[in-house]
Image: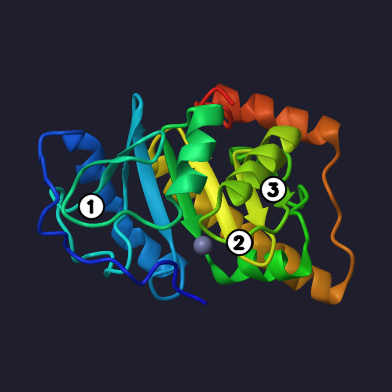
Amino acid sequence: MSREGADSDVDADANPDPDLLRDAREAVVEYAPALADLTPARTGNLSVREGERVAVTPTGVPYDSFDAADVPVVSLDGGRLAGRMAPSSEVPMHTGIYKHDRPGAIVHTHSPWATTMATLHRKLPPVHYMIAAVGREVPLADYAPYGTEELAANVVAAMAEADSDAAILANHGLVVTGPDVETAVENTRHVEDLCRLYLRASAVGEPHVLSDEQMATVEERFESYGQQPDADGS
Ligand SMILES: [Zn+2]
């Protein structure tokens, strides 16, 4: 099934409560169209956290077809608090990550190059210094069915063990977190590009991997230029 949760529609009984998490919901409206370039059909989703609540893309609708009052707001326990539309079926993964790490935003895609890595059960090693935007590698999270707490737990465990802000989901796709949604979207593009680079290089030979020492130097330079790979505190 390529489309996660095809059951969404406007819920006439839902309270839109447009003032709740207004900034976060407007950010979802602003950045959701970026998913169209990153993921096939309507398979991606993103969310923005504010305190203990999360604004998340609605399920089953085009990314440019909703406004802030449509955007669902859920609690970290997954309960619906506001919004006319039903939330993404991947809410358990988003809330599971937020409960563990408290990033400001999460982007999930089935972007083709990262998803190719996912089918090969490959993690992304540091083949290029730009990986420092998310960590020293992008780990592989064990497979679990989409929309489950088990998938959330696998993603949290993989990211924590690798100290990374991103994870490749086995036979599924990619998750990237960030201090804000702009950074999370940008870093999703970086990881997708690096997966493409890695796979192209692997088609010709064995890519060389940067050492821990070389990556430490990159991390220092990122910090001195104001780019902070660990700006979300993870
Ligand atoms: Zn997915």
Residue 219, label in figure: none
Q: Please say if the residues under marks 2 and 1 sit with CB atoms less than 8 Å apart.
A: no
> Which structural element holds mark 1?
helix
Mark earlier in primary sequence (3, 2):
3
Please determine whether, in this image, residue 115 is positioned above or below residue 2. Answer: above
Residue 138, label in figure: 3
Residue 135 shows up from this direction = no
Query: Crowdedness of circle 3 by 10 Å Cα count: few (<14), some, many (20+)?
Result: many
Query: According to the image, label 1 marks what residue?
Result: 29
The residue at 55%/22% (across/down) is: 233
Query: According to the image, label 2 marks what residue?
Result: 145
Q: Amino acid at mark 2?
A: Pro
Check the image and tell me how it is coloured.
rainbow
Q: Amino acid at mark 3?
A: Val
Q: Amino acid at mark 1?
A: Val
> Which structural element holds mark 2?
loop
The residue at 42%/39% (across/down) is: 105
Query: Crowdedness of circle 1 by 10 Å Cα count: few (<14), some, many (20+)?
Result: many
Image coordinates of residue 86 in percent, x first then y, are 27, 56
Q: Nearer the viewer, residue 192 or 90?
A: 90
